[in-house]
Image (tube, coloured by chain):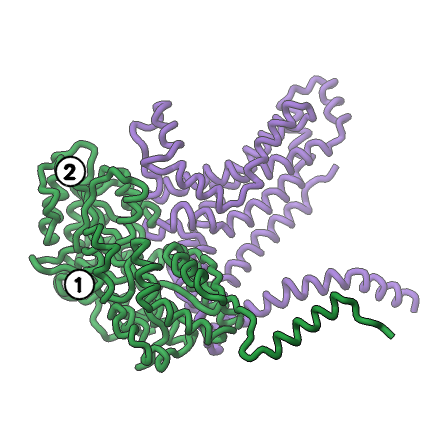
Amino acid sequence: MHMPSLRQAVFAATLTSVALVPGAAFAETLSIWARASSSNAAQHMVDLWNASHDDKVELTTIPDNQMVTKLATSVQSGDVPDLISFDLIFMPDFMKAGFLTDLTDELAADPNQAKVAQAFRDLASYEGRLYGTGFTPDVSILLYNKDVFAKAGLDPESPPRTIGQLQEYATTIKEKVPDAYGYYFSGSCGGCNIFTQAPMMWASGATLLPTSGEAPAMEGPGVAEVLTMLKEMWEGGIIPESAEADTGANFFSAFEAGNIGMVGSGGFAISALKANHPDMNFGIAPLPGLNEGQASSFVGGDVIAIPKGAKNADLALQFIQWQLTDEAQLEGLAKNLILPSRTDLADNKYFQAEPRYIVTAEAVGIGQTPYAFHFNDMVNADQSPWLTMIQTAVFDGDVEGAIEEARRAMQDIAAD
Amino acid sequence: MIRALRKSEGFLYVLPALVFVAAFVLYPFGQLFYLSLTDTSLLGGGEFVGFENYIKAFEDRSFWRALEFTVRYTIFITPVLMGGGYALALLTAPNRPLRQITRGIIFLPVVIGIGSSSLLWFWLFDQQVGLFNRILVDIGILQQPAVWFTKADMGLLAVIISITWKVIGFGMLLFVAGIQSINGEIGEAALIDGGNYWQRVWYILLPLSLRVILLTTLISVIGSMLAFEQFYIMTGGNPRGQTFTSVYWIYQNSFISFKLGYGAALSIILTAIVLVFSTLQVLLSNRSPSQ
């Protein structure tokens, strides 16, 4: 007869004791995918969770431009992560496709959900149901170089409050400061421009992306004016020549060179500039509209959701509810100078030391996010109607024709 | 009976290869063809639509413009790679230490991923920080750093430069193998008969390495017709979509616009076009002289 060895006996006893202890369970490991541009913020949250929970979260970073494809193919193949953090702009397409778990009841019972920025609550809703919530937000702002302003004889503490002033200041910089440019934008990047130029249009009252084939597109005040402003600045040499071909690689780095007066950018720029260029004297302002008092922003960033078929959906829900708590929002995000997704925590002890964050926090309140299906096709694609419109208007000089063609193409896509 | 058994025996020998081809080539290709007959989206769903995608493809001006650009790229880059590769092979074919080291150095970029090399060249061509621009300014070819990707022709030239650097060593290596396999006595006989270097290259080396040249050209043409990464990274299809290649346009439709069915139809059309090119070259190759 085979006698069990001491090691086998101990192993069996351990297994038995674990099984007999009420509630005893092995710690789980949750998987989360986050796109590259928000993975830094996501990592802070994951680290904070892992420091205080037995169940661990493992973050996988996905390149931004592969996230849509990766999620779509993973859902189709049934091999999905437990959580996914992605650009909120894709929520309508993913919700409509049935890729995400319905969290309506669970989030309705969470008092923190009502405090999440409105843009996230809107974009995560489809046919009256809720499929996700805010995770790591960012907003677009106007970034300006105070030293360049001073050299041009402009008041560094008075950024432009209308697009007319923006053009005027940019022209002054070009005229007065050798080797400097007044303004910069990435002329071949649809996503960059919806983030930074579109808010100036809708601050002025424009309606941009259609929700159906008959809905208005590229209409209202601001569209032609912003495009004309860019066209005139381009023709006047106020924008660097390299802007035309920039697919987004220099979206932020162009400003880092120190010879750009103003650029549309994101809240992320504050911590990036403070870390990489501590001596740079820069300011933050809301993106202006046509008239004084008009300002807006693109509320971007990432939502967090549970893909359909996630293996640890219950634990994933716990993580989502935890990341909305005061502790996670303040110690995970604000402490690392990242905007919290809850608007009630925008004014916090960490931001009070850096007034420039107050501008970004306020931008969340005045900002918008377009709710559109086929966003990729309309805006992000390399030959999207939105990008083609900007290029035709600014670089070819045909503003009205560009708008008309974009309107037709967008409505065709929306009707599909 | 024995003859029949022998036939079966032969079939059994090739069966593993047939199974491999069926599983990894024919079945996926069949799936691709079926997909091309549907309006399947990357986001799910899809119905059978017959040849609707093909009809749409023939009316898709962007696809044909991308194909035209791809052919133009292939026509420009193929002679550069073949001519340059052969010239380098002539220089480095003899097995002497310095020439072997030179061969190794020229071949080195071949082992770098095309994505990495494209990214490297993208920044080398950058107007602000690009080293390539700086060198051209320093040696007086340019007055000031150029913006390479705002004009389609300049963008194409930039990609051709980067790809030439990346893959010319591959052609060179195949040509070296071809040249070294030629019986040395033929060259010696020509030398005794008073043939100079270029006469030996023209009348002996070139004709006797024609099969290798045609094979390498075939590989190069197929590679160029399927170009994607270099344009995706370096030009992004710009300006105004003028540097989209066929594969780039297929990618746009399949993964950006989510139209998998339509993308599959475009892929089938491109496969057919490449197949015609390849068949022509194989036929030419079969008619070339052997040693």
**Rendered location of residue A272, percent (x, y):** 31, 47
Number of callouts? 2
Label 2 crowd bin: few (<14), some (14–19), many (20+), radius 10 Å: many
Query: What letter labels the chain drawn in purple?
Result: B
**Rendered location of residue B32, percent (x, y):** 55, 67
Q: Nearer the viewer, residue A124 or B243?
A: A124
**Rendered location of residue B175, percent (x, y):** 64, 35
User: Residue at 46% of width from left, 39% of height from top?
Assistant: B162
Question: Is residue A75 at least partly visible in the picture?
Answer: yes
> Mark 1 — on which chain does it sit?
A
Is residue A85 rendered to the left or right of residue A344?
right
> Mark 2 — on which chain does it sit?
A
Amino acid tagged 2: Lys
Q: Which residue is mark 2?
A: A174
Quadrant of the drawing holding the N terminus of chain A: bottom right
Residue at the farthest right position: B2
Is residue B269 rendered to the left or right of residue A364?
right
In the image, residue B221 above or below residue B267: above
User: Residue at 30% of width from left, 71% of height from top?
Assistant: A123
Quadrant of the drawing holding the C terminus of chain A: bottom left
Q: Nearer the viewer, residue A229 or A101?
A: A101
Q: Disc 1 and disc 2: Cα gap in Å? A: 27 Å
Element under disc 1: helix
Q: Which residue is mark 1?
A: A202
Amino acid tagged 1: Trp
Label 1 crowd bin: few (<14), some (14–19), many (20+), radius 10 Å: many
Element under disc 2: helix
